[in-house]
Image (cartoon, grey):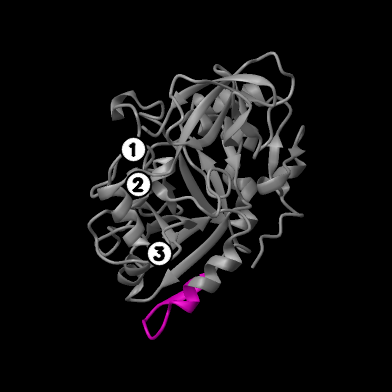
Amino acid sequence: MSVQTGDNPLLHRSGAVAAEGPDAGVAWHYGDPTREQRLLDEGLAVVDLSHRAVVTVTGPDRLSWLHSITTQALTGLAPRTSTEALILSPKGHVEHALHVVDDGETTWITAEPGTGDALVGWLRSMQFMLRVEITDRSADVAVLGEPIGREGVDGEPVVWLDPWPTVAPGSVSYAAVADAEHPASGRQWRELLVPRGDLADAVGDRPLAGTWAAEALRVAAWRPRLGLETDHRTIPHEVDWLRTAVHLTKGCYRGQETVARVHNLGRPPRRLVMLHLDGSAHLLPPSDSAVELEGRAVGRVTTSARHHELGPIALAVVKRNLPVDAVLLVDGVSAAQEVVVSP
């Protein structure tokens, strides 16, 4: 079921400017995106993510079943413990990214806007005779993003705590820096799941920040997002998604052969970088803009943003063998690489 966002009360707040593209249905900003970024950095603001898909899985086989069809080890997932999982194609390409938390009776999943119908359809196709029930809750449950770094507890709404960038047990990092030097080290971010009718009350008197602010902080944290940093060919290694979403020794799942082969025997064909863009241009390059070296396309921009401290930045996926010190061009603008995934 697609999320109906036309009656979103947070889009009627003073100064709200609606987002377009993948974040349509929520606010892009509320009049001052730079201030909104600072409020998020300070842990004070909240972001409307009510366009995200919400799916529940119930039944006694729910965790063992999800364990068998995703990239993450889920059989021993404790209540109120958050994790992340991917659904891959048979060839190992990323198809769905799942934010997963179990409350002891129900496994809650949030996923990218617009993916709920496809996700529910695929999950039901894999149900077979197992004791699980899949329900699309997008119409009655909404998501808020909060810069808070703790799991939910009994008596609170369901919370998914983003594990990024902590390397999960059984996982590995492909980043070019040590974990302590990762720009997202110490990052605090979680999703709060609330009844859609209680969305405004859940925000309360906290200031709102739009997706402009949230995306700028995500880019600075090197955090991949499905449909932006990924395309139909993306494997998890290319965007450092193994660190939080893939357990390398948990057993069989669709696409595992590719994950294991690339990890053990080869290197991913592309790699994620962050670009520091020349600030002389007035406009940011749109997604899919060509990244060029000496007149040749060597990659594409996935997300661009204007960060309140770093200025204009972007994530991009480039060829693995591109020299790490090469100065690139994007829409005629100079772009210096910051290596994310090591070549």
User: Closer to us: mark 3 or mark 1?
Assistant: 1
Snapshot quadrant of residue 54: bottom right
Residue 23, position as x, y percentages in the image: 66, 46
Label 3 vs label 1: CA separation?
29 Å
Q: CA distance from mark 2 to mark 1?
A: 8 Å
Please identify the quadrant where the N terminus is shown: bottom right
Q: Residue at x 66, y 20 (%)?
A: 333
Q: Residue at x 69, y 13 (%)?
A: 280
The residue that label 3 is drawn on is 107
Question: Which of marks 1 and 3 precedes in the sequence?
Answer: 3
Q: Secondary structure at mark 2?
A: helix
Image marks 3 and 1: residues in contact by CB distance under 8 Å: no
**Alpha carbon separation for disc pair 2 and 3:** 22 Å
Q: Write the start and end of the magenta stretch as one range.
A: 123-135
**Residue 206 can be seen, yes or no:** no
Residue 213 percent across, percent down from the top left: 61, 31
Local SS, label 1: loop
Most foreground residue, 143 or 272 = 272
Which residue is disc 2 drawn over?
A: 242
Amino acid type, mark 1: Tyr
Residue 164 lies in quadrant = top left
Instruction: Name which residue type carries label 2.
Output: Leu
Q: Earlier in the sequence, mark 2 or mark 3?
A: 3
Given the image, on which type of amino acid does mark 3 rest? Thr
Residue 12 x, y percent position in the rendering: 77, 42
Comparing labels 2 and 3, the label whose residue is closer to the camera: 2
Question: Which residue bears the numbered disc 1?
Answer: 174
